[in-house]
Image: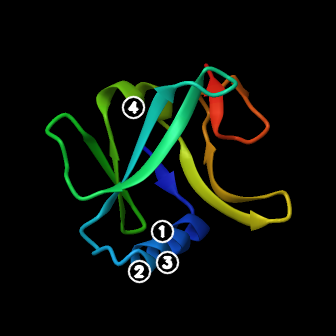
Amino acid sequence: MITVTDKAKERITTLLTEEGRTPDHNIRVSVKGGGCSGLMYDLDFDDKINPADQVFEDKGVKILVDKKSLLYLLGTTLDFSDGLNGKGFQFINPNASRTCGCGESFSV
């Protein structure tokens, strides 16, 4: 399962409105090769659910994950920070053995 913090939900709702998207848009989270630690997160809006997607819902936010990425993301929490140390979405991933300083890439 993938969960969403209250701050992440608020920011997702704000972005949907600012970008003129409908509530039909879901959040797609995936893992791709790259970044300074070997793997990196990809986060985007998507209004299509593929047959092989795993769908999670937390706090009214639907999260889509492809099967390959699911292995790396199980148990992850999506958070949002707007503090002095950085602004943006953050992944709290119990599967990551190492993360880079920016928090956008990791390794297992």
The local secondary structure at tag 2 comes to: helix
Tag 3: amino acid: Thr
Q: Nearer the viewer, mark 4 or mark 1?
A: 1
Instruction: Give x and y (percent) for residue 85.
Output: 84, 57
Q: Between disc 3 and disc 4, whose residue precedes?
A: 3
| Residue positioned 32% across, 73% down in the render | 21
Instruction: Give x and y (percent) for residue 4.
Output: 51, 58
Q: Is residue 67 left or right of residue 31?
A: left
Q: Nearer the viewer, mark 3 or mark 4?
A: 3
Tag 2: amino acid: Thr
Q: What residue would you read off at disc 4?
A: 70
Q: What residue would you read off at disc 2?
A: 17
Instruction: Give x and y (percent) for residue 24.
Output: 24, 68
Q: Does the residue at mark 2 contact the one at mark 3 (Cβ under 8 Å)?
A: yes
The local secondary structure at tag 4 comes to: helix
The local secondary structure at tag 1 comes to: helix
Q: Between disc 4 and disc 1, whose residue precedes?
A: 1
Q: Is residue 68 above or below residue 79?
A: above
Residues under labels 4 and 1: Cα distance? 21 Å
